[in-house]
Image (cartoon, rainbow, N blue to C red):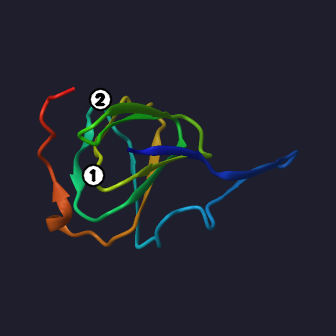
């Protein structure tokens, strides 16, 4: 199941500096970000191989995760909160604030064959 972690952040009178170093369980091969979202739902898939780390660097959004055993909703509303998404988590993002910028770090390059769009059966 997805795990929410706090990224190391240094704060002083000048502001905040958040670091992503030696904390992700994968080498970053791709970075993308989602912004300017209306009331749409994004995502709606899981992966065969790709691990991801999602950070809402501005604003907020919710991420629903289902790993076939349990379901959970994570609210990302601070730029130091990072959601680690294993490949088996079928997930979607929703409830984006108007100013939201969701950055995602991925362990693999884009591969259309890595995506699984079918939901798990409703058994919970």
Pinpoint residue 49: horizontal percent, then vertical percent: 27, 65
For label 1, count other residues whose C-alpha is less than 10 Å away and answer few (under 14), some (14-19) or many (20+).
many
Q: Which secondary structure, mark 2?
A: loop
Relative side of 40 to 18, left or right:
left
Relative side of 65 to 25, left or right:
left
Q: Is residue 98 visible?
A: no
Judging depth in this view, the residue of 91 and 12 nearest the camera is: 91
Q: CA distance from mark 1 to mark 2?
A: 26 Å
Question: Which of pointers 1 and 2 lies earlier in the amino acid sequence?
Answer: 2
Q: Quadrant of the N terminus?
A: top left
Pinpoint residue 124: horizontal percent, then vertical percent: 22, 26
**Residue in the image at 30% along x and 56% along y:** 87
Vertical arrangement, residue 81 with respect to residue 49, above or below: above
Pinpoint residue 66: horizontal percent, then vertical percent: 28, 38
Vertical arrangement, residue 1 with respect to residue 121, above or below: below
Disc assigned to residue 57? none
Q: Which secondary structure, mark 1?
A: loop
**Residue in the image at 16% along x and 65% along y:** 112
Question: What residue does disc 1 label?
Answer: 88
Judging depth in this view, the residue of 13 and 43 nearest the camera is: 43
Disc assigned to residue 39? 2
**Residue in the image at 47% along x and 45% along y:** 3
Disc number lying in front (1 or 2): 1
For label 2, count other residues whose C-alpha is less than 10 Å away and answer few (under 14), some (14-19) or many (20+).
few
**Residue in the image at 26% along x and 69% along y:** 110
Residue most extreme to the right: 13
Quadrant of residue 42 within the rendered picture: top left
Vertical arrangement, residue 31 with respect to residue 2, above or below: below
């Amino acid at each position: 199941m997805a795990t929410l972690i706090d990224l190391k952040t240094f704060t002083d009178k000048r502001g905040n500096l958040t670091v992503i170093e030696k904390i992700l369980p994968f080498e970053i091969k791709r970075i993308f970000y989602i912004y300017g979202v209306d009331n749409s739902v994004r995502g709606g898939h899981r992966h065969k191989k790709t691990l991801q780390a999602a950070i809402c660097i501005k604003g907020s959004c919710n991420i629903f995760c289902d790993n076939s055993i349990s379901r959970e909703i994570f609210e990302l509303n601070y730029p130091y909160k990072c959601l680690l998404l294993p490949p088996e988590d079928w997930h979607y993002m929703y409830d984006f604030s108007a100013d939201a910028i969701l950055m995602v770090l991925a362990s693999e390059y884009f591969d259309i064959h890595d995506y699984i769009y079918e939901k798990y059966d409703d058994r919970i």
